[in-house]
Amino acid sequence: MQVFDTLQELGHEQVVLCSDPITGLRAIVAIHNTSLGPALGGTRMWSYASDADAITDALRLSRGMTYKAAVSGVNLGGGKAVIIGNPHKDKSEGLFRAYGRFVETLRGRYITAEDVGTSVRDMEWIRMETRFVTGVGGNGGSGDPSPVTALGVYSGMKAAAKKVYGSDSLSGKRVVVQGAGNVATYLVQSLAKEGAHVFVSDIYAEKAEALAASTGATVIAPEAVFTTPCDIFSPNALGAILNDETIPQLTCAIVAGGANNQLKEERKHAEALRDRAIMYAPDYVINAGGLMNVASEVDGYNRDKVMRQAESIYDITMNILNIAAERNILTIEASNAIAEDRIMKMRHVHGNYIGTPSIRGER
Ligand code: NAD
């Protein structure tokens, strides 16, 4: 791996390797861009096959956080960290406190949170060594982000419906929801309340059945999500599920879901959806409610404000869909362009000296 070439190509500012042999810590903190504010992003713990895989994941995920924050109007930059290890076997107080001290050395350039393989308890260990951590329990903590994420997905889905059908009502629309987990549960509740015909699936049939029983949705088999006739397909399970095999099978007019990195290859598969006249509501735009939720913790958590912010994903999505239509570009290109434009303009704004010298270099 040509490390510096890769960093410059992807636009990263800083990558920190953290090692502590006594506790077994091997961590990588990737700070992609801090033009808008401190880089916020979770810490993932995973048994990576190689160090290069771990670095690649940290680079890819941190860049995604920059775009997500920028497009959703949050004053945060993009960062992400990975800890190399098995989350079921290798966790300890020492490991997370050693990691917390490395986060502290960055003095607020990077703020961490939970991610795949880490939990509230791990964040509380990190919190013993640094205040630059969100997602801790107790007073002032933001708690479960899923209801906020689901509200954003629902709002973005309604904007897409307005664009495609001329009305944002989802009443009577057939919506296939992949996954019956945290986000899907709150999403399906809202859809059912509005009178949509919802089809749910999960690889754990009992999860889909429980969600269907409480909402009146219909259970379908996991492999049926791509072929069940519907108006809207909502992926809320895994990434890369929009690909060469699945896109030709889709029957929907809209894809709008909460899963991260839905397009296996961003440009190629966004084009494949457009060629099939399927409107794609960009994943990182409509699932930004979770980020809004933890971001609020940085300034003092306010649930009402966060819910209003998540609802604003309707307008953010509509703007993106309008720009894509006006300029005849992909929806993902429109959202990327809006994010890059905001970063460029705020970098310029912050370049203006405002006459308050600070030894801490605050903006
Ligand atoms: P979750 O683990 O609670 O739910 C995911 C569900 O998908 C699980 O029930 C799992 O069994 C199911 N699943 C896995 N593979 C499947 C398949 N092939 N077919 C059907 N179901 C399958 O996770 P979550 O918190 O609800 O998150 C869902 C997605 O949204 C993830 O991609 C996550 O990264 C993304 N996301 C979540 C949040 C949040 O606030 N929780 C925020 C932003 C993005």
Image (cartoon, helix red, strand yellow):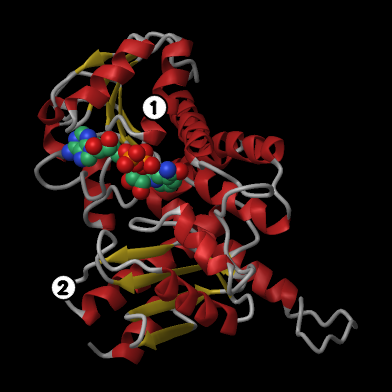
- 351 lies above or below 114: below
Question: In the drawing, does residue 357 fall left or right of residue 148?
Answer: right
Closest to the observer, 3 or 213: 213
Q: Residue at x 61, y 62 (%)?
A: 342
Q: Amino acid at mark 1?
A: Thr
- 170 lies above or below 346: above
Residue at image mark 2 = 49
- The reply to whether the C-beta atoms of the residues labelled 1 and 2 are less than 8 Å apart is no
| Marked residue nearer the N-terminal end (1 or 2) | 2
Question: In the drawing, does residue 29 fall left or right of residue 221?
Answer: right
Binning the other alpha carbons within 10 Å of mark 2 as few (below 14), some (14 to 19) or many (20 upward) gives few
- Residue 357 x/y as whole percent: 87, 87
Helix, strand or loop under label 2: loop
Closest to the observer, 104 or 168: 104
Quarter of the image that includes the N terminus: bottom left
The CA distance from mark 1 to mark 2 is 33 Å
Q: Residue at x 47, y 84 (%)?
A: 14
Q: Residue at x 16, y 30 (%)?
A: 226
Q: Is residue 275 visible?
A: no
Q: Amino acid at mark 2?
A: Ala
- Residue 125 x/y as whole percent: 51, 65
Residue at image mark 1 = 185
Closest to the observer, 304 or 316: 304
Q: Residue at x 73, y 52 (%)?
A: 300
